[in-house]
Image (cartoon, grey):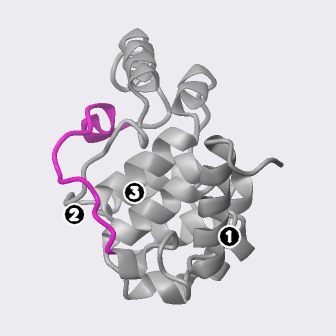
């Protein structure tokens, strides 16, 4: 996967992090966040999937060398060292759910600046700017037959069948079932 993403546009990186499902993908997320070219929207997605409200409610000092199990700390440590300054992509509700954003901002009001053992940048508390990600079909695992198996093997969210004739046949069968021409 790293080989695929290394030369890919950040749009594909954001699309890929949106396809991750669980902590099993933290190694991939860690790799993305450790790259100097990582866009702010990717970092914001990773930050909010790491449950920042929990970390504010249970404040602990950040580990100096965060690993894949410490995505919250990694985002904040890397921010402090100058990462995620490229902000070309838009942080959308799929990345940061508005209710979670509101909840975190409310929690931050309870903690005056400097009372937590870490600082959350205001940019993460109010993510704005950028343009929506647009992954070309030749780079989308939904449409590119050479990428689908890589994403499927890693357990990332992709359609059940690879792009191509079999997927078209399955769609046609589903349509015929829906309109009642074919019974199950």
Residue occupying image coordinates x 54% and y 72%: 31
| Above/below status of 35 relative to 99 | below
Q: What element carries label 2?
A: loop
Q: Is mark 1 on a helix, strand or loop?
A: loop
Q: What element carries label 3?
A: helix
- Quadrant location of residue 111? top left
Q: Which of the numbered marks, if any, corresponds to residue 161?
A: 1
Badge 2 is on which residue?
86
Which comes sooner in the sequence, label 2 or label 1? Answer: 2
Residue occupying image coordinates x 44% and y 22%: 104
User: Which residues fall within the magenta stretch?
Assistant: 120-136
| Above/below status of 138 relative to 119 | below
- Quadrant location of residue 58? top right
Q: Can residue 37 be seen in this view?
A: no
Q: Which of the numbered marks, if any, corresponds to residue 42?
A: 3
User: Could you tell whether 68 is left or right of 75 in the image?
Assistant: right
Residue 95 screen position, x and y as percent: 42, 43
Give me the C-alpha separation between circle 2 and circle 1: 35 Å
């Amino acid at each position: 996967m790293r080989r695929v993403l290394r030369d890919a546009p950040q749009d594909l990186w954001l699309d890929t992090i949106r396809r991750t499902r669980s902590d099993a993908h933290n190694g991939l997320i860690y790799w993305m966040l450790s790259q100097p070219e990582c866009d702010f929207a990717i970092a914001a997605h990773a930050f909010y999937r790491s449950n920042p409200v929990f970390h504010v409610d249970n404040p602990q000092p950040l580990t100096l060398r965060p690993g894949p199990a410490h995505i919250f700390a990694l985002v904040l440590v890397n921010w402090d060292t100058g990462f995620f300054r490229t902000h070309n992509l838009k942080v959308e509700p799929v990345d940061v759910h508005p209710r979670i954003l509101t909840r975190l901002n409310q929690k931050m009001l309870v903690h005056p600046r400097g009372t937590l053992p870490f600082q959350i940048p205001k940019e993460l508390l109010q993510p704005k700017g950028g343009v929506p990600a647009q992954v070309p079909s030749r780079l989308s695992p939904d449409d590119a037959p050479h990428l689908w198996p890589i994403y499927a093997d890693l357990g990332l969210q992709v359609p059940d069948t690879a792009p191509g004739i079999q997927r078209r046949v399955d769609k046609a069968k589903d349509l015929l079932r829906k309109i009642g021409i074919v019974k199950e």
